[in-house]
Image (cartoon, rainbow, N blue to C red):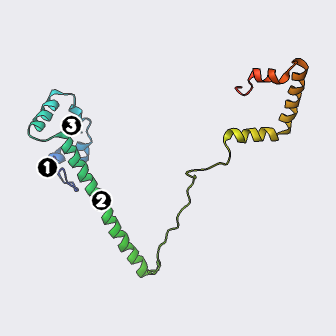
Amino acid sequence: VAMTRHREDMALYYGQRSFGLNGGLAKILSRRNAKETTLDYERGTLYRQALRFAENRGLNIVRVARTLLRDRVDWTIRQKQKLAILTLRLRGVGVRLGLFNSRQTHNPKEAAAMVAGVTLFANSIKDTVEEKLRADPAVAKQWDEISTRFRYVFADPETAFRAMNFDAV
């Protein structure tokens, strides 16, 4: 069995007689432990020797990987171009069939952001909380009760209140 590599297409070559005797192509290729990759031997000494052999002859692994990646990117770009051409051809067929108006221009509207990037507030969080608390009648009533009790307990309630440092709480 042989397969071509490093190409966009794939060709498989096999001897019909050999595969016919062994139950056919599907049975042969689906055998257990029949599929291997070079990574199966990564920890072996032969793998390291093969890497050293390649590096000694100028096949730097990083350069090889970069080349393979560049080939994949080039292939992707070619596929994108083919898809764009196919889209134009299909649109032309749609125009001829009357499914699309050939004069129609496509002006996409600018979509509003789902979440605003920057929001400005007139007051800080602390100021906003203080405003809400001052406006709450239940808090005002409780504050009056506490102030009254302070006057009963302390001779100088304002000095005692400052000494307790309620702002830190």
Local packing at callout 2 (Cα closer than 10 Å; few below 14, some 14-19, many 20+) is: few
Which quadrant of the structure image shows residue 129?
top right
Amino acid at circle 2: Ile
Q: Which residue is mark 2?
A: 77
Q: Residue at x 54, y 62 (%)?
A: 111
Local packing at callout 1 (Cα closer than 10 Å; few below 14, some 14-19, many 20+) is: few
Badge nearest the viewer, 2 or 1: 2
Q: Is residue 69 above or below residue 31?
A: below
Q: Which residue is mark 1?
A: 15
- Looking at marks 3 and 2 on the same chain, the residue that comes earlier in the sequence is marked by 3
Give residue 124's position: percent from left, percent from top. 66, 42
Image quarter of the C terminus: top right
- Looking at marks 1 and 3 on the same chain, the residue that comes earlier in the sequence is marked by 1
Q: Which residue is mark 3?
A: 38
Q: Residue furthest left?
A: 57
Give residue 77's position: percent from left, percent from top. 29, 59
Q: Is residue 49 above or below residue 136?
A: above
Q: Could you say whether the residue bearing mark 2 is in a helix, strand or loop?
A: helix
Amino acid at circle 1: Gly
Q: CA distance from mark 1 to mark 3?
A: 25 Å
Q: Does any portion of residue 76 appear in the rendered image?
A: yes
Amino acid at circle 3: Thr
